[in-house]
Amino acid sequence: MKKLTYCLIMALGVIFLSCKSQKEEVKRNNDVSDEIISKLQAAGFVTNEGLRKFEDGYLVEYDIYLT
């Protein structure tokens, strides 16, 4: 019974921490201009999550690098 309680507490902690990091990622999108966002949407990319400025280009959908 103690092991089950411990596992449930750990699972809830992991879920809580993962949700927090996604919210912080969305806040970082403010450094991408509206013009770039509209161009990416016109090209078919999802821009509401995983979009951020990266080096000389942009990271789209968490793993696609575009210059």
Image: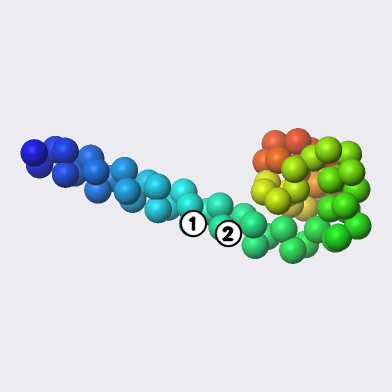
Badge 1: residue crowd in 10 Å (few <14, some 14–19, many ≥20): few
- Where residue 32 appears, as percent x and y from the top left, is 80, 58
Relative to 44, residue 55 above or below:
below
From the viewer's perspective, is 32 left or right of 20?
right
Give the CA distance from mark 2 to mark 1. 7 Å
Image coloring type: rainbow
Q: Which residue is mark 2?
A: 24
Q: Is residue 24 above or below residue 45?
A: below
Q: Is residue 23 above or below residue 62?
A: below
- Residue at 23% x, 40% y is 7
Camera-side residue of 52 and 11: 11
Residue 34 screen position, x and y as percent: 86, 60
Q: Are marks 2 and 1 in contact (CB under 8 Å)?
A: yes
Residue 54 appearing in the image = no
Residue 20's mark?
1
* Left or right: where 60 falls relative to 26: right
Question: For residue 4, what is the image quadrant?
Answer: top left
Residue at (37% x, 46% y) in the render: 14
Q: Quadrant of the C terminus?
A: top right
Q: Secondary structure at mark 2?
A: helix
